[in-house]
Image (tube, helix red, strand yellow):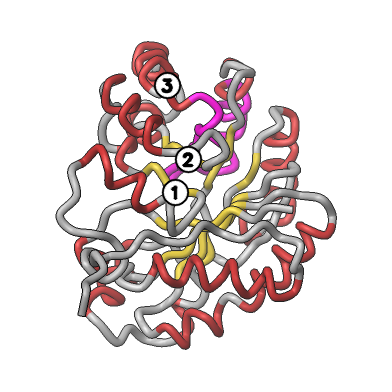
Amino acid sequence: MRLHVGCAMWAHPPWQKRFLPHPLPPRERLRSYATWCNAVEGNTTFYATPSRSTVETWARQIDPDFRFVVKLPKTITHEGRLTGIDEPLHSFLTAIEPLGPRAHALWVQLPGSFSPADLGTLADFLRRLPASHRYAVEVRHRAFFEDARSARNLERVLAGAGAEWIPFDTTTLFQSPPTSDAERDAWTKKPRVPRVSPALTDRPIVRYLGRDDTARTVEGWRYWIDTVTGWLREGRSPTVFVHTPDNAEALMLARRFHDAVRARLPGIEPLPEPIPAEPPTLF
């Protein structure tokens, strides 16, 4: 059994010299991160399609069984709303080819205005995608979380394409008022929707957002410890991304989540040993 865990990025200033060596050249940053976690969210691709040479650099730093969940550019999902996007989609798919099997899933994050009335557009889009990739969809319109019929229709569309539904669980963040600047910022930007835990394929993906307080983050993920343990027992292979508003402790927390599940299922393959953030000294 193998559980994949990761964060929203592979380089973050608060991690420097605490968790990861610093300075590191760009060609080494993902490699260093991959000694801590075995998955990562590819959020940067939402803002711009990377050059093929950049993606080749990423691929050289990680093993083929590392999971890179790559977000489609906003020109496709938010500006084009999945229509009239053949050219940017082709450019994106060409650019990420060097990732090969490391591209665990292509992540279609849809805007909050993408409603159940738009499911036909999503179905048409998924049908036209190449079968060489797995796909996972994140929706944010509240109807998908509050209306059972809308949720069933979404699951039907996704199942027809062999795609996953990525839940972004923000319930811990919104349980009580924010207590830090990062939490206040997250309150204005993150979706406030009920928790769902679909697993439409054998490779479910979860995004969990906690608090800047580590104890509250750990308390809030108990539901996911139970759920992920159950998925693994069913023979599924989940990927879990741990976020906090400031992400200062996210790298450590992702490993802690993995340890908590592994305590229940000792047969899970362990994560690699992180490389030291500071070189060893003689004294």
Answer with left or right where residue 252 lies relative to residue 200: left
- Report the magenta residues as a range: 100-124
The answer, for residue 167, to whether it is visible in the render is: no
Instruction: Tell me which numbered mark, 1 or 2, is placed earlier along the sequence.
Output: 1
Identify the disc placed on residue 68. Answer: 2
Q: Which residue is painted at 51% across and 24% down in the image? A: 100
**Residue 88, which numbered label?**
none
- Name the residue tied to disc 1: 40
What amino acid is at disc 2?
Phe
- Give the crowd class for mark 2: few <14, some 14-19, many >=20 residues within 10 Å: many
Residue 161 found in image quarter: top right
Q: What type is the residue that disc 3 sits on? A: Pro
Element class at badge 2: strand
Labels 2 and 3: the sequence-earlier one: 2
Q: Label 1 amino acid?
A: Val
Q: Are marks 1 and 2 in contact (CB under 8 Å)?
A: yes
